[in-house]
Amino acid sequence: MEQQLALFLNLLIDGISTGCLYALIAIGFSLLWWLADIVHLAHGGVIIAAGYAGHVLISRFAAPLWAACGVALVIAVVLGLSIQRGAYQKLRSQGTGEMGMLTASLGVLICMEYGLAIAFGPEGIQLDAGSARTPLLAGSGLVVDAYTVAVIATTAATFIALIVLMRVTQFGKNMRAVAENHDLANVVGIRVNRVVLGASMLASAVGVPAAVVFLYGRGLQPSDAIHIVLTAAIVAIFGGRGSIIGALIAGLFIGVAESVMVWFFDAGWREAITFSLLYVLLLVRPEGLLGKSPR
Amino acid sequence: MEYVLHIATIAGIFAILALALDLLVGYGGMISLAAAVFFGIGAYGSALLTKGGMSPTAAMIAGMAASTAISMLIALPAIRVRGIYLLIVTIAVQVVFTIVLQNWRSVTGGDAGISNIAPYSIFGVPLRGPLFTVFVWVSCVAWWGILLWVVRSPFGQVLQALRDDEIGAVSLGKDVVTTKLVAFAVSSAVSAFAGALYAHYSTYVDPHTFNITVSIAVLLMVMLGGAGTLSGAVLGAIVLTLLPEVLKFLPLPPGAAAPLRQLTYGALLVVVVFLRPQGLLGRGATPTPGG
Amino acid sequence: MTNRRAFIHDFGLIVVASALPTRLFAQAAAGEPRKIGFLMPLTGGAGKLGSMMLEGASLAVDEVNSSGGAGGRPVQIVQEDSQAVAQQGVAGFRKLVDVDKTAVIITGWTAVVSAIAPLASQSKTMLISASTASPAMRGISPYFQSSWMFDDETVKLILPYAKDKLGVKGLAVLTVVSDLGTALAEAVKKDWQRVGGTLAGEEVHQQAETNFRPILLKLLTSKPDAVYLTSPIGRQLAQVVRQARELGYKGIFLSYGAFEDPEVAALGQQADGCYYSSPSFDATGATGAGKVFVDAYQKKYGRLPNVHQANHYDLIYLYKRAADALAKDKKDVDGATLKDYLSANVAQYQGAAGLYRFNYKDGSVLRSSIVKAVQGGKFVKIADLG
């Protein structure tokens, strides 16, 4: 039984690591959804672009990790801002409806995906975490390494920072007001467009740690873009509209479920089970775990 | 010539699919990325049943019935949720469908699919080549006419009322539940019809032909042509079928050619939304589905 | 579809050419090019592999064209991107046959071949492939011929070697959910039992999987000596090996030719212990025709070629051999004549990638094979397998 227990714990740890990744990609997507009802499908493209930027710096210019992250951050924010201003806000002011926005976002995602494929080739990139992957508790049967600890720590730090931002800063309060009610926020004097722009910068920024985790973990290829944003959307809905903690819990839940399910089921059916659970959730509690009532 | 016929046939089949989706999305305001599911049910249904000895027409009808039944899986949640929530429900059904096709090997043949499907025949007369292409387009026009009648009927009026103002419609005593269920039933049945045609035409079905990429393509056909116009759906199908083929003839550097084509595709979508957000044939601003 | 004008043109050329001393003829071939279709994945997950294969074929085409062409005319490759899916494969096939009028198409990947084989039988287009390994393709069409061994046969080569020479007792299998993966896993399990080994476990994964850690965690609890990998995608194999090594697995990996991929080589030390059976092409230790190819490839592209490029180089030369003979007999070179010529005259073929023994009855082939391993970032021959 000891062996089975070790396996279960290892699956749990792996699940938490995956879950952190999911939470990170989801929160950026969620912010724009809450604040401006934008289904930011292009978010997947922004994350992948950030990953490629970091990869280029590390593998071609032998830059240290912090420098690569910095450049990736700048690129992600610039991309996110451009899409927000150049596409979403322009279209909104033209009176484009929900589906037009969806189509435009999808179009941008496709452009980013294939633009990267043309520039870098379709095969994808990967970085080796090297010594960060050596087990910390050798001999115990548990697979825990410095990398996993770093992922969990980064996620925790990011979410704490976000919550503090939302509660304490004026910008955070403005964001909450806009999420609650656009028109009222306008009346009170909040520049809604400005706040949404700031939120899109924030959303892109939060995607950068996720890109780095992908880079060192399972690799990134341009064709991952749509799968990434789909996962983000699922976690966002699962967690519930408007709740940062909800996104974190949802991400962890889904990550752990995917991992631990291997213990019970053939890996082939895993994804089917995840989506079936999602389906049941939407039937029973569409507002997600910690969300307010659906709009 | 065969090449042209091939493109024409595929365009016709997707035109039927797009018409079916327009009923849901354009007239009903219910976003769905599960078009390929019903397309696939029709296709696999025809493949399996005709191999088992059924006549193609009977197999087609059986496929349409099965499709209607399965569509209730989406229709029921659609009563409660809309917008992005409904979108995710449809995506969930779509993804699970593809996984079932791939893993339920004993029935669907798994990843290898089902091959050697006989051509479509009526009363024992096989329809091949140009004859089949004509049949596809005649069916398309027929469904166009039927759906036109549907959207102009009282049922259709209620459906559009739901799209524009659900709360208002309910307060007037309209039966929301039945309307939504019927809309899904009709849409999925027509999609299954297109699927049956596809199976007999390509003689080969596999899970990759009915995955989320195809659903996205059909949604884009509706959007491009103009949601809520029916004729827009047909136009969108023709344009989006022709486009990748036309781009193939452009002199592009090899290696970069294929992704460059896809990129142009994406760019065109963005441009259309900017220049003409209501689609090519739509009128005025798009209604906001989901209220 | 005989084009009389072209035929007479060719005939005239050959008459004139045979009257000239050979020296004068060794210049770029002239005349309307012979088109060969190349219907392979050029984008998408398998795009890199398809592009690599194109490189091998292109090199051969350049060489052929600068030394008289095939059957007296230059050769031209017409590419179509199949994306390894049936629908694109069919569209590409239609364009190659109806618009470009190609008589022979180099193609691959089970989904594509399954869909176009019946069409090829109808249009009498010859399909030649060095990238289709599923045993389900046996006998799919008289117009389909593979130059890459079907995997149920390659599997039987490496397992006895693993048991006897590598000391493997417990074998675990990582099966990809696909027609190829399942057929392969069955063949492995059956043959492993036959040679007297024990099956330590089996796990399944989806085709698009990138995170293998949970599956590997489960698979490795039974502490296998070796893991057999069924995925045909080099990148995916590299992922599995890397992630398994990160989890602390120090055992052996076994596979078939798909291991020979730059991504696996790039793993460096982590890839030590990866063994696979391969057609007897060894870039580092090549001799004879193989060495000629390796040198030419290195000159053009600046790196060493792999077995896939060698295979496709050979396909072009195989075509040339048939085209030359057919043109000499004043016959057209189309799908039917190619098929007839090959079946009647080319039971064996010695190419840059080794010896081919074709079986035209079911479209299969037997290749001289070797065991290779990944060592220090290179693919190195370890032993002969016959």
Image (tube, rainbow, N blue to C red):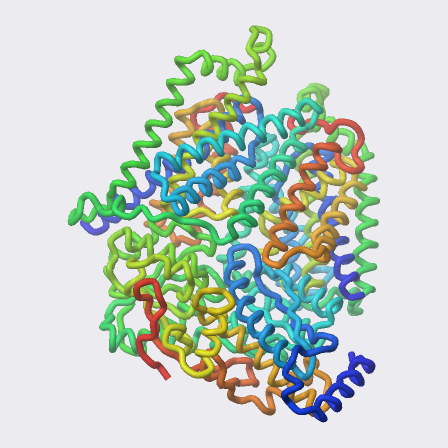
Residue C248 x, y percent position in the rendering? 24, 53
Residue A270 x, y percent position in the rendering? 42, 49
Q: Horizontal placement of B210 versus C178: left or right?
A: right
Q: Determine whether C171 is above or below C384 in the image.
A: above
Residue C170 x, y percent position in the rendering? 25, 67
- Depth check: give the residue in front, A135 or C3: C3
- Depth check: give the residue in front, B138 or C69: C69
Q: Residue furthest left?
A: A139
Q: Quadrant of the N terminus of chain C?
A: bottom right
Residue B52 in view, yes or no? no
Q: Quadrant of the C terminus of chain C?
A: bottom left
Q: Determine whether B77 is above or below B192 in the image.
A: above
Question: What residue do we see at 43% from left, 75% from top?
Answer: C152
Q: Horizontal placement of C258 versus A6: left or right?
A: right
Q: Determine whether B163 is above or below A52 in the image.
A: above
Q: Quadrant of residue C181?
A: bottom left
Question: What residue do we see at 81% from left, 54% from top?
Answer: B137
Residue A128 in view, yes or no? yes
Q: Quadrant of residue A216?
A: top left
Q: Residue furthest top?
A: A188
- Depth check: give the residue in front, A65 or A86: A65
- Depth check: give the residue in front, B179 or C55: C55
Question: What residue do we see at 76% from left, 40% from top?
Answer: B225
Residue C177 x, y percent position in the rendering? 45, 59
